[in-house]
Image (cartoon, rainbow, N blue to C red):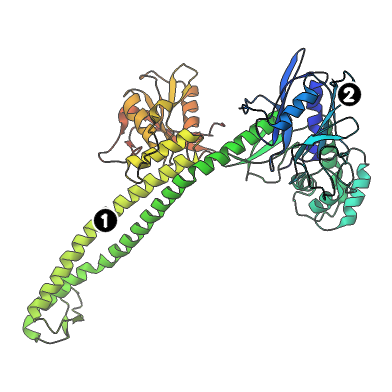
Amino acid sequence: MAFDGAFLHTVLFELQKAELSHVEKIYQPSKDELVIHLKKKDFSSKLHITARNGAGRIGFTSAQFENPQTPPMFCMLARKIFSGARFISASQKGLERIIELNFSAVNEMGDSVSPKIICEFISGSNNIVLADENYRIFDALNRSDITANRIIMPGAEYIYPENQGKLNILETDIEDIISAVSSKGGEVSNALLSVLDGFSPLVCREIAFMAFGRVDGDGADFCKLKKPLEICINAMNAQPRYTALYQTGVPKDFSFIDINQYGNTYDKKQFSQGSEMLEAFYRERDNAARIKKQSSDVLRTVNNLLSRAKRRMSLREKDLESTKNREGLRISGELIKANIHAINSGDTYCEVQNFYDENLSLVKIKLNPALSPAANAAKYFKEYKKSCAAAASLGDLIESDLKEIDYLDSVLESLERAKNTADIEGVRQELVSGGYIKEKRSVKKTNQNTAIEQHTSIEGYKILVGHNNIQNDYITTRLADKNDMWFHTKNIHGSHIVVKNGGADLSDDTILAAARLAARNSRAKNSSNVPVDYTPVKFVKKPAGAKAGMVIYTTNKTVFVTPWEE
């Protein structure tokens, strides 16, 4: 992630809003995070510091945290030192991924002291350190070993990591930076990474992309780096463009500048505040990871069922292909029967004229020498009838396989759109109802129909959204009136959408809103110009024996829309 020194520098401006506020409360919701409630006149917010590997960050948050009943020792020590203290300032040494929070407090002896909280966001070793004004450590979330190069233990002196000798873009002339980059040779992005302090690989690639139109170029004209570097300086000082990158709805990366190097590979969301972006990014990433973990067993089951159905259909298609020559079996029987007088018992083959051929060509027919000529003819007729029956049966079975594959694909699509545990449980119960998996005795059934997603149109009509096939059936066949309007993406798996308009005319705005909801809740959610069909519910029918969520409809209109963003 691009929570680099340059990004951290932009966060300092947000922290300035909290200067001179008092520490009202301190919490430690988990072993690697700290929440400090700061308050003053016209300002009240929670400062969230996370030292979790892969998610280290600092920023204001509006999230609610569940705190342990008994505070950890680190939290109790932080309360002892900082409760009632005044937050003075936040500072950063160069562009290190370390930020100091400076406070003014009164100790147990009544003396004025200036303790600090040092937040380290160094890759693989995030930490929160409590220290006094002389950098003497009170304690740290992650203590070091006594043999470590930097000792982080109570009583030790806090020492900054060794400087790597890179250039600070805020203190170095741009021409000097360009000269240093040009002297490195090779790819410009790698040269920038080795020269600039506090810049992540993502930002270095974007600078190269802005200058040369590609991230892996070797840069013939290094003067083109001037404008991108100026953009970064302006963003770091006062004009950040916080950008989060998403792929199929899952957060992938972020930065304090606009990111364009990936073209249309990723979707982008932009934010005005770094704290707002970090909170949204990690909340969505953690939620996606949690959902992925919870859905892994159901996903594996559906994929196995889908693979099995496809393999079964493939075998049946091969068997059906082998029956295509069944007419030849009947002709062989007819030819033997017509020439029975010329065939002797014990012959292994016969060669006769094919009167079904306009040229009366000779055809060689294999015979079973243990059977009489009449029995050989009967054998061919029997095989012909068997092949005909098999062809009819296999055609029906393949059609059934196609429907099952289509259904399981829709279940897979529901899992891909799952936003919470309830959505996953709904899919699991659907598979139980369909007989695909057995119900776990320990799992209590919940009524998924009570959790139907609802929206309200501009005209005040309720808009219902199904999250799985069971819910799709419920809103279409139970909740919807025959005159309500029904929406679904055209030939694309997705949710059933019902507008409860009771036959009243819908405005274009409501039609577009419902269509965009249908597009968002479908496999085409990351596409544009998505076709969505809509028709009154009375024209939507569920065929007898059809699986959950499977319907047919007529008399529809189609509108092309771009899916709604979450």
Viewed as shown, does residue 393 lie left or right of 1? left
Earlier-in-chain disc, 2 versus 1 = 2
Residue labelled with disc 2: 113
If the image is split into quadrants, where does the N terminus sit?
Answer: top right
Viewer-nearest of discs 2 and 1:
2
Residue 540, by quadrant, is top left
Residue type (three-letter) at the residue carrying disc 2 = Val
Residue 433, by quadrant, is top left
Viewed as shown, does residue 417 lie left or right of 4? left
Q: Do the residues labelled 2 and 1 touch (CB within 8 Å)?
A: no
Outermost residue on the front side: it is 109
Q: How far apart are marks 2 and 1 (CA)?
A: 85 Å
The answer to whether 166 is drawn above or below residue 244 in the figure is below
Residue 100, by quadrant, is top right
Tell which of 495 and 19 is nearer to you.
19
Q: Residue at x 67, y 46 (%)?
A: 262
> SS at mark 2?
strand
Residue labelled with disc 1: 395
